[in-house]
Amino acid sequence: MSPERGLRLLLRLLPFDLRTDHGREMEQVFQEQHREARTHGRAQVMGVWWRAAADVARTAPREHAAQIAQDAGFALRMMGRSPGFTLVAVLTLALGIGLNSAIFSLVHAVLLRPLPYAEPDRLVAVWNRWDGAAAATLSDPEFMDYEERSRALRVAALASGPVNLGVAGDPERIRAAYVTADLLPVLGVAPARGRGFLAAEEGEGQGRVAILTHGLWVRKFQADESVVGRTIHVNGEPAEVVGVTPAGFLLPLDFRDDRPADILLPLRPNRAAARDRRGGHYLQAVARLASGVSLEAARGEMGTIVGELIHRYPDQHRQGHFGVTLTPLRTDLLGPARPVLILLLSAVALVLLLACANLASLLLARGESRRRELAVRASLGADRFRLVRQLLTETCVLGVAGGAAGLTVAGVGMKALLALDPGTLPRAHQATLSLPVVLFTGAVSLATGIVFGLLPAAQISRGALDDVLREAGRSSVSGRGRLRRALVAVQVAIAVVLLVGAGLLAKSLARLQSVPTGFEPGGVLTFRTTAPPVRYHERPEVTAFYARVLDEVRGVPGVRVAGAGSGLPLSVHSGDWGFDVEGRVVVRARPAADWFVVTPGYFEALGVRLVQGRLPAEEDSELGVPVLFFNESAARAVFPGEDPVGRRVRLSRTTGAEQPWRTIAGVVADVRQRGLERPPRAEMFIPLPQFQHFLAGPQARDMSVVVKASGPPLALAGAMRAAVRRVDPEVPAADMRAMDEVVGASMAARRRDTWLIGAFAALALAVAAVGIYGVTAYHVAQRRREIGLRVALGAERRDVVRMVLGQGMRLVGAGMGVGLPAALVATGALRSLLFDVSPNDVSVLAAIVVLLVAAAALACAVPALRAARIDPAIALRDE
Amino acid sequence: MRRDQRPLTPAEFQVLLSLADGDKHGYAILKAVARGRDGIALGPATLYTIVRRFLTSGLIAESAHRPDPSLDDERRRYYRLTDAGRAVARTEVQRMESVLAAARAKNLLRRPRRA
């Protein structure tokens, strides 16, 4: 590289002004130094280079800072001179930037932060895969097989369930996570106090040891340091506290549930049991890749293991295209939250862009009055670059001021968003205005300043130079007019995109609200309760417990009918269970249905329609004929075109003795068990006294009581708690809710998204309408004389109105021309958030077009009428 | 404090001083400064930052006087000290002198030897 080229590159670092004024001189001086040094040898030449570089490095930052300070000082003085504009601009930007920061704080808290584990990229989620179930839970034997056979993975398992914490008189129902001793080591997390579980503790009796989560430790034990070693009561049994989790720690299942677990208990997979009892799917599994093993290699190994298992247990696994899915834990846990956060972030970005377009057109309008000042500066020798830089500094200062004010908006907005969030966004409650959020705000503020300042700065500076050059100002005036119209068209386009998105979400919500739920939530109260195994060990005890609870409940005045079930529509569901049909030979795969345990009164209280046969009754006792109830989907799937009532089925054996043959006694209507958006699945209902496996899982001892009240359901809440207490003072009645609330909660996330996007869209529409009004009014004012002339020459007022309206409609047309195709592209990404609505739903698009045209007509009406009232005599005389 | 009212930096003072005995171009200023006792080694960027500031505040001006073209480089520009610049330099020297006097009064410095 020649010395000249090298130096020129170096000088690039200096401020533009210094380079323009003295660049050539600096080069020349350097050349002379260089030439002289060459006569003294290489070392001297290196010295010259070194000193020049050090010199530039010292000078450049200082001079740039001085330059910016000078421009910013000038910008502040200019802002002070037009406080009205400054206030409007800062408030607009505060709103626009603040919304972005608020949403970004959620995006950061939920999506961007690393998972709270060591080397989280080495963790994977392990799921079974069957036809129609991409991520299904594992059974004990399956988990143990994966754990034992895999070399590439260290697998740990966990499951959740409710437990009662505390002593007689003051029991509290909390959420427990049952975890294998390996879980914390696999996650790479050490307890903040005490120790983790030992492998031996998996085998011993449940409830002997427990680890408190940080949250429970603070809430229930006042962060008592001496808690480790203390004995607490879990489900009525004593357990020793051996550890406390660190603050901020979340279990993988906490990311999926709306409430995090409170306590960790040892999971006890039955290692001694025969491995061919492979039903009972309830475990989630997480694994760490062995060092040096890639995810692909682990998938390959798991494929081999799956092949061996299919070969070994053909009855269980040679069906439904069984397989095992390994997903990076991050994707598995955070993936579901992505679409809605991306949607919200895109929507607020559009709102900010809209604010930019709006401010740009305000700046253009204001530019008229600044042209003189800029022209004077131009005539004093400021070139266009300097004028643009000055104007951009002003908008960036506005942007930063807006961003600073926006942080306040962000703080409020974030709290509002969290209040609106029904717990669907994992770890969203950890969102704060942290450093990354502040940095994001700063970057957005500067970018905003440049975006909304660039076009006006280029345009205004050109106008100012034109004035200096004594060119006719008219061409640039019309140029600015065109630019303002283009900016309004952009605003219309943004409004179109947001409106279409809001319209589609609103239609989805309406569709969802009209989905037949299969039950009548009105007047129904529900709560959950558990019969702890320590006192209600086997079938007779559990059955008697619920019989007494229901007796007490039915005795409360105002209760019309009551029952209990292991499931609750839209809220609590279960896995499936395979069965044989009497007289049929299994050809390829056994039929299966989701299973629930119910008592008499359950369907009546929920208002579920009986389709065929009868409902569960008192006769379905332990000694009665074993029976089963199907829902319509199960009846259709298993007995297509046949009468299911009276047929017999036998559930697959899981543990213990062979299941009895059960007669199908009745068929009930389908209920939306897994949420309004999920179609009903085949389901079966087993009478509580005829269910055997109380120790296999929590399902049958943890029941929802449903009560149909004759009055407002929540009025009965106190009486219900008292009723349960009369049966057992150590058993709490939890999750007391009206069934209407359960239905509402199932739609809460969707309702929030719809309202938010709807509010953004309404804001956009209002801003665009104001923009159309502004441009049209300006247009009418500019063309007063021409309109007067036309009227004088015989044009009808109607023609004038039509002309002005046409002007506004052309803007809307241009905006829609850009906005509709953009909306069609954007809503494709919305697909996963829609329910029963196509992303290019014609009726929504048509409604948006009508809405926009109406809004534009309204915005044009005032200027159009003003134009129509122009008196030609006055208009022509004014000129 | 405005920029043109604050005390001169040593480099700035040296630039003014170098022009006191005649008009110079940039490289000549650099060499004159380097010969000074301060041992300040000015680089081109620092020099022209100062030149630009002095031109703006009127302490120096571009000189119309140019030497014979055969000895000249057309890219060079020559600078001269204005009356204002001379006054500022003189004020600075007087300030230094009073500092020296004060230092001597406190025996920080030996009295200059009489020749």
Image (cartoon, helix red, strand yellow):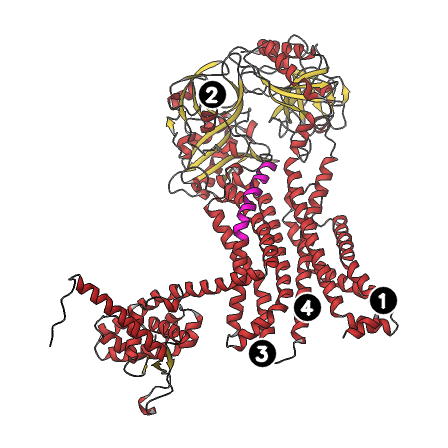
Marks 1, 4 in one chain: yes
Q: Earlier in the sequence, mark 1 or mark 4?
A: 4
Q: In which quarter of the image is residue A588?
A: top right
Label 2 sits on what residue type? Answer: Asn
Label 1 sits on what residue type? Answer: Asp
Residue A799, numbered circle: 1
Relative to A785, residue A203 above or below: above
Q: Marks 1 and 3, Cα distance to the nearest angstrom?
A: 40 Å
Q: Marks 3 and 4, Cα distance to the nearest angstrom?
A: 22 Å
Q: Which of marks 3 and 4 is nearer the N terminus?
A: 3
* Residue identifier under label 3: A468
Q: Is mark 2 on a helix, strand or loop?
A: loop
**What range of the chain is rendered magenta?**
A402-420
Pointer 3: residues within 10 angstroms few (<14), some, or many (20+)? some
In the image, residue A322 lies at what x, y percent? 56, 34
Q: Earlier in the sequence, mark 1 or mark 3?
A: 3
Q: Which residue lies furthest to the top in this view?
A: A623
In the rendered image, the quadrant that contains the C terminus of chain A is bottom right
* Residue identifier under label 2: A270
Pointer 4: residues within 10 angstroms few (<14), some, or many (20+)? few
Residue A311, numbered circle: none
Marks 1, 2 in one chain: yes
In front: mark 3 or mark 4? 3
Q: In which quarter of the image is residue A137?
A: top right
Q: Marks 3 and 2, Cα distance to the nearest angstrom?
A: 90 Å
